[in-house]
Amino acid sequence: MFELFMLDYCGYCKKVMAFMNEHGIPYKTINIEEKQNEEELIRLGGKRQVPFLIDRERNVEMYESDDIIEYLKTTL
């Protein structure tokens, strides 16, 4: 299952989640408003930027909504 670090008010996050919902892609959201989630995001990706997608099955981690959506298209 994909993990998506996000913020509720982030338009780019909403864009990625809308794509995933449209295509029935299961994912878990991780809201970085919680301090421990923010720290985990920075530990994993190196910066405080969302959306940040993790695909543990394929060992892929990435920022940027358009890049994430293009990647997700390859998994459909």
Image: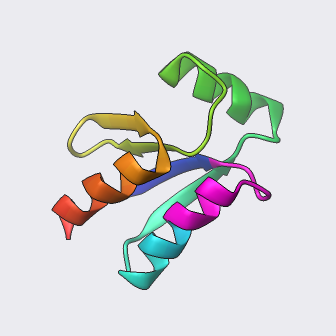
Residue 8 location, quadrant:
bottom right
Relative depth, front residue between 70 and 29: 70
Location of the N terminus (image quadrant): bottom left
Q: Residue 71 in the image: state x and y as whole percent.
A: 27, 52
- Where is 56 relative to 12, above or below? above
Left or right: residue 28 versus residue 49 is: left
Q: Position of residue 74 (x, y in %)?
A: 17, 60
Q: Nearer the viewer, residue 49 or 53?
A: 49
Q: Is residue 40 above or below residue 50?
A: above
- Give the residues in magenta: 6-16
Name above or below for residue 4 compared with residue 76.
above
Taking the spot 63% from the left edge, 65% from the top edge, the residue there is: 14
Question: What residue appears at the point 72 percent right and 54 percent down from the top-left corner?
Answer: 10
In the picture provided, is 61 more to the left or to the right than 39? left
What residue occupies the far front of the structure in this picture?
66
Residue drawn where x is 53% and y is 50% of the image: 4
Q: Position of residue 51 (x, y in %)?
A: 57, 45
Quarter placement of the C terminus: bottom left
Looking at the picture, how far across and down is residue 12, in whole percent? 60, 55
- Between residues 19 and 43, which one lies in front from this camera angle? 19
The question of residue 52 being in magenta is answered with no
